[in-house]
Amino acid sequence: MSTTIYEARGAVAVITMNSPPVNGLGFDLRHGIVEGLARAEADANVRAVVLIGSARAFSGGADIREFGSPRASAEPTLNTVIRVLENAGKPVVAAIGGACMGGGLELALGCHYRVAIKGAQIALPEVKLGLMPGAGGTQRLPRLIGAEAALNMIVSGNSVPSEQLADSALFDEMFERDLLSGAIAFAERVVSEKRPLKRVRDLKVSLANADAFFQFARNTVRAAAKNFPAPLKCVDAVAAAVAMPYEEGARLERESFLQLMQTPQSRALRHAFFGERAAAKIPDVPEDTPLRKIEKMAVIGAGTMGGGITMNFLSAGIPVALLEMNQEALDRGLATIRRNYEASARKGRLSAQQVEERMALLEPTLSYDDLKDADMVIEAVFEDIAVKEAVFKRLDEVMRPGAILASNTSTLDLNRIAEFTQRPQDVVGTHFFSPANVMKLLEVVRGGKTAKDVLATVMSLAKRIRKTAVVSGVCDGFIGNRMVEQYIRQALFLLEEGAAPSQVDRALESWGMAMGPFRMSDLAGNDIGWAIRKRRYRERPNFKYSKIADRLCERGRFGQKTGLGWYRYEAGRRDAIPDPAVEQMIADYRKEIGAQRRAIGEDEIVHRLIFALVNEGSAILQEGISSRASDIDMVYLTGYGFPLQRGGPMLYADEVGLYSVVDSMKRFAANPHGDPAFWKPAPLLAKLASEGKKFN
Ligand code: NAD
């Protein structure tokens, strides 16, 4: 299939970009455009050229499938294509419909004229990958829409509908429909009126008080994007468009683009971008697996999780039957859902009508009979295997054949739950994170017998409710909580050795975690970890655990919900206030176990906790619980407040170098209070480190 189609329409040559889905500017397409233009230039009957894409996209920008390959930088590069267009001897008109983004917009800016259809999406989104436009976008866009509007688009990366730019010089004409015929008619007029070959680079941008404007912009951007260098570089580039001749500004843009390409922040953002797409694919489940229909949902349990889970579906327009044990619990659950929606309405995020539309999709019930026509049910009852057993046996009786039966369990064995039914192939785990209506992450737990079409259906449903779904095999804690257990174990050892909870939290938070481990435990409830540890003491008697957190729980300090935890909390406030009583408790405990207090640096705190994640992540990969390192990173980025600029624990380890990670682990093991068993590198990590390889 040819990536461009050339056609003469009278005196106008039409070059149609034809590289689905979005006319990504891969090597073949770039080549095709240059060839088409040469053909038009060579044909004496052709007087003008129209460059057009598909209804879906003029062009979505660089071809992401080519990223990192030699084809991405092979000639003709995008810069070359743009130069050829701009220097053409016949007028070139870009006809823009659908997405016109990144390199796609830069391509259009290289044309002499631009016409568009209303509703086309215009953007320079490179900043979202830690980059900036690198083919003249920062220099040409301000020349057409003004420095201020261009700066907003380039720094935010957000797309703007074409009609919003209708009054700017970006577009010479705008149509409601029939883009191609409108573009051809426009091109014919350019010829008949003998209009000049307008080159955007020759225009001037004027801006009153430019210095003050850009200084203000730098201050704002520096504060808002402190972990990312790209937005500030974007400001510098737009400032150059105002202050410098085109060639100089373009050189500065190119240099900054290449520098940004080498930053860890951009690598992290690109990793997250591709990681999100990769996570949706399951290695042994074909992409064309037929999906089961999901038009109606059921949820069991209207507590903390069940209510939030239900909201996800209502918000996506999917009806939900919500079942509880008794009327009182049902009423309470319903009231919470309504209250949450009304709070969003007060903040202007929903209209009153939308609140009612969503509530109308909800069918509260106490009877399993009302679940019969649901296509999928998610159980979110108490975390007790006997309760789960009763619920799944009942679901097995009432749900129609082929319905998907899901459990939101965090710690119970999904395979055991599946065996409570006669249809384990239809059983899957859907592990939401609290608050379930807000948190992006969904761990999809694949049981030993879960059918492939069940998995494919749940992954697609996750997209409908805007979650980032990551598949996990069955193990205790799945991906996220299994890793976090090791992270918390290290945090507790640090207290024994001399750190204070606030010191540990501060170190992790200044490194970029949304919340340190102790604030996080206080929020989740310290009793949850306590229950798990009690189980661990039986299951793994040789495992070394600090008992310091048990002491806290024995005092009833369960965290925010009791007003006291690792910190104290004042009524109605969430600020974590360090508490001398906890300091004293820790000091007493140190004395009891004979630990010598020492000063511990921030770097040691951070790396002990993060490398604890990395080591467990390696084991998870090796056991096949997770099929790719980037999936683990997506779990941490979307469910645990891991800093985006670091790309997730596994990417961070790759950036540090696995050899150095293992080296640090040896040092931690040698600490007199250290636990050599804890710091034994997982075999996969040891192997990759010795071979000089990476996870990703
Ligand atoms: P919760 O106690 O807030 O809610 C449980 C609800 O289930 C209650 O409203 C209860 O009345 C109802 N229920 C109990 N037995 C029932 C039955 N037989 N039939 C119908 N309804 C019944 O608990 P939660 O925090 O929402 O947890 C629910 C599930 O989600 C558990 O499996 C838990 O492990 C899991 N989970 C919890 C979190 C979290 O942060 N709370 C996160 C992920 C997963």
Image (tube, helix red, strand yellow):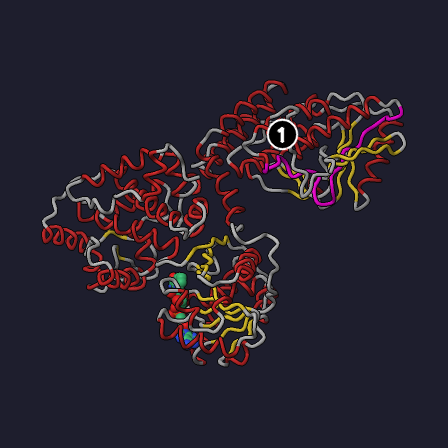
- Which region is colored magenta? 45-65
Q: Is residue 299 left or right of residue 652?
A: right
Ligand 1 found in image quarter: bottom left
Residue 332 versus residue 640 in the image, above or below: below
| Front in this rendered view, residue 71 or 464 | 71
Picture coordinates of residue 191, whole percent (x, y): 86, 27
Q: Secondary structure at mark 1?
A: helix
Location of mark 1 (residue): 137
Identify the residue at image location x=21%, y=60%: 550
Q: Assess mark 1: CB under 8 A from ligand 1?
A: no
Identify the residue at image location x=25%, y=48%: 490
Does the magenta segment cover residue 58?
Answer: yes
Q: Quadrant of the N terminus?
A: top right
Does the magenta segment cover residue 342?
Answer: no
Residue 262 versus residue 582 in the image, above or below: above
Residue 599 seen in the figure: yes
How many numbered discs sit on the rendered protein?
1
Picture coordinates of residue 618, whole percent (x, y): 36, 45
| Front in this rendered view, residue 191 or 259 | 259
| Front in this rendered view, residue 296 or 108 | 296
Q: Is residue 41 left or right of residue 370?
A: right
Residue 436 versus residue 483 in the image, above or below: below
Q: Is residue 543 left or right of residue 246?
A: left
Picture coordinates of residue 401, whole percent (x, y): 56, 73
Picture coordinates of residue 555, whole percent (x, y): 20, 63
Q: Amino acid at mark 1?
A: Gly
Residue 348 seen in the figure: no
The image quadrant of residue 615 is: top left
The image quadrant of residue 672 is: top left
